[in-house]
Amino acid sequence: MIRTGDQYREGLQDGREVWMDGERVKDVTQHPSFKPIVDVRARMYDMAHEAKYQDRLTYVEDNKRNTIFYKPPRETKDWTDKLEAVDAVMQDIGGVVTRVGDETIGEVWSLIDGRDVLAEFDPRFADNVDRHVQNIFDNDIFHISANTDPKGDRSLPPQEQDPDMMVHVVKETDAGIVIRGAKYETAAAYADQAFLKPTVGAWTNETLSDYAVGGIIDMGAPGVKQICRSSFAGRNNPKDYPLANKFDEVESLVIFDNVLIPWENVFFYRHTKAAQFIRATLHRYSAFPYVHRLLYVADMMIGAAMWNAKQTGLDKLQSVREKLADLVCYREGINAHLTASITLAEKSPGGLLMPNQSILYAGRVHGCANLPAMMHIARELCGGQICVTPNSAAFESEGSGPWLQKFYSLNKQWESEDRRKLLAFARDLLNSDYAGHRLTFVQFAQAPHFNHLNAVYNSFDFSGPLDFVRKAAGLSDKVMGTGK
């Protein structure tokens, strides 16, 4: 089925415990820090019911209409359909959001590939995967991840720290397992459920197995408490910060204070092999929408920079065009990696169509590692006006407004209000607190840079280059370890 925006909002009014700035949030659907992003997610739900978008966002199977976003990819068209659906959403909302369900569902698809691994320990857990994949799909659930623990002192093993620094099982009951600990996660305060999984990847001994736990957590479950960072929404006039006031995706420290995970929601427990598998395959699908979002960030930087250059005629300068071309190369590099990863996609162990892993992970490195430099180029092209332009109130004031209208008007084509709007947009995209937060999010949301590179190393087939050089250099078979 496909939900409506109102059904989504109603699901959030479940008595969940959410805190921000020292106060408990009574209703995340109405709180000024959450309402804008809740409304964006609700808009995505409502779009699926509109004739204009329905065929792009949904499809019919077995007489049921379902969302394109959650359809497990089994052929190339499934991926191209997702691209078209994301484009429809981004164009409609006029901005970029990342954690709205279609990214984190990829981590559940990884569970499909690991079903046999989970079945080794307990067949029930593999059955749980099947049921939850179907449940998310059938009920259009806003599903997110729960990945990063506070960790504490990383020089110490978990056993030598406060045990709550990493999520762990404290007891088993007939009803399920009881966990304690915490996770940092984006969008948890306004999501339906999360896939909880371990941070530790290099399991080495059985004393760590209490931390090898994964399952589904309802965000309104007893014992789940969320402490959110301060939001960028509502701090300033939306006229001055149009992106921060609409698209801020709030992070939470999600605390699990003796939370019961029913057995039917457990994917693995005390099964380090399963934990290792999940860590190793976590982003094989979810990296695609993550990188795809950067395509739209690049478009916003190109558009903001180009309009700023065009308004004053600087787009005719060769030096300006070269910088714009740098932004275009960045954008098209992302596009090329995404396109190639689908074109050269691989069948996964679970029978899904998996983006070519080496190309996809290389694209993630390209998109994330080069973003700071691209933001700086866009900032240079926009110029110092994004840090000196007064706010909208100054433009509207009887005392200061006429002067600003005089000095910010260029000609009949570019009057002061359009220039003010463009500079406010560029400032929020490139120079604001929100811009800095988004940059850091991109750098670390899936993994830090060294882990991005490690994923490339592990997914690339080195046999081709090795064999080419062995033959070109005339090396003997001994170097392959098979010669005598």
Image (tube, rainbow, N blue to C red):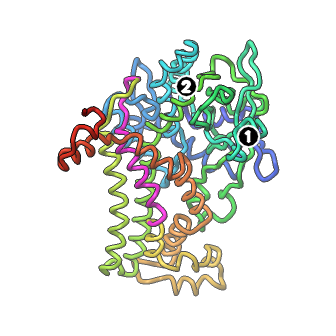
Q: What residue type is labelled 2?
A: Ala
On screen, 224 above or below 296?
A: above
Image quadrant containing the C terminus:
top left
Instruction: State the SS at label 2.
Output: helix
Q: What type of secondary structure mainly makes up the magenta span?
A: helix
Front residue of this view, candidates 126 and 236: 126
Say few, some or many: other residues with alpha carbon within 10 Å of mark 1 (under 14 / 14 to 19 / 20 or more).
some
Q: Name the residue under label 2.
A: 274
Q: Is residue 429 above or below residue 360?
A: below
In the rendered image of this protein, does residue 349 appear above or below residue 386? above
Where in the figure is residue 34, as x and y percent of width and height?
Answer: 67, 48
- Residue range (magenta): 350-373
Tell which of 277 and 287 is nearer to you: 277
Residue 456 appears in which quarter of the rendering?
top left
Residue 165's label in the rendered image is: 1
| Residue 356 is inside the magenta segment | yes
Which residue is located at x 52 percent, y 80 percent?
384
Horizontally, residue 314 falls left or right of residue 252, namely left
Disc 1 to disc 2, how far (Cα)?
21 Å
Q: Is residue 340 left or right of residue 27?
A: left
The number of callouts visible is 2
Q: Looking at the picture, how far across and down is residue 31, in whole percent? A: 72, 48
Name the element at disc 1: helix
Q: Nearer the viewer, residue 473 or 368?
A: 473
Quadrant position of residue 223: top right
Is the residue marked by circle 2 packed among few (<14), some (14-19), or many (20+) residues within 10 Å?
many
Q: Which residue is drawn at 54% across and 59% down?
A: 439
**Amino acid under label 1?**
Met
**Spot occupied by residue 129 in the image (x, y as percentages of width and height):** 54, 21
